[in-house]
Amino acid sequence: MMMTKRSVASFLRWGSVVLVMVCCLVYFLEKQGSEYSYRVYELEKGFGYQILNNDKLLIQQDFIPTINGYKAFGTKEQARKAAIMMIDKLQAKQRPTLTEQEIKQLMR
């Protein structure tokens, strides 16, 4: 079956419309699919945090990562900053870890 110029143009036009609609749908679903939040909580000797994805526990951090031993964050603000940094990494599709340098920055 041979396609005429008119049918090729129509096919391309409708194909473009469908492609744009699919891209919009994928963008919308991805944007709606991951709602990250955090909770800071008090421990016996400091603070920890939880990262939630759509209200489901994703990460629970009771101690400061990259530091020898199990030492909690000294202040609520330090735990809050760490939680926000983790959410930023998750949203950027980065590995959810904190480096020693990032921890030192948070402790200031």
Image (tube, rainbow, N blue to C red):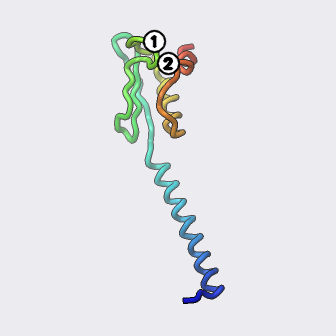
Mark 1–mark 2 Cα distance, whole angstroms, equals 7 Å
Residue 101, horizontal then vertical, whole percent: 56, 19
Marker disc for residue 74: 1
For the residue labelled by badge 2, is the local secondary structure a helix, a strand or a loop? helix
Looking at the rendered image, the quarter that the C terminus falls into is top right
Q: Name the residue: 52% across, 54% down.
A: 27
The crowding category of the residue bearing disc 1, from other C-alpha atoms within 10 Å (few below 14, some 14 to 19, many at least 20), is: some
Which residue is labeled 2 in the image?
78
Residue 55, horizontal then vertical, whole percent: 36, 38
Q: Residue furthest right?
A: 5
Q: Which residue is more in the foreground, 97 or 14? A: 97
Q: Amino acid at mark 1?
A: Gly
Q: Name the residue: 54% across, 59% down.
A: 24
For the residue labelled by badge 1, is the local secondary structure a helix, a strand or a loop? loop
Q: Amino acid at mark 2?
A: Gln
Q: Name the residue: 54% across, 89% down.
A: 1
Q: Which of the 4 quarters of the picture holds residue 74? A: top left
Q: Is residue 4 left or right of residue 63?
A: right
Residue 54, horizontal then vertical, whole percent: 39, 41
Q: Is residue 22 left or right of residue 6?
A: left
Looking at the image, is 9 positioned above or below residue 78? below
The crowding category of the residue bearing disc 2, from other C-alpha atoms within 10 Å (few below 14, some 14 to 19, many at least 20), is: many
Looking at the image, is 57 positioned above or below residue 9? above
Q: Which residue is more in the foreground, 76 or 17? A: 17
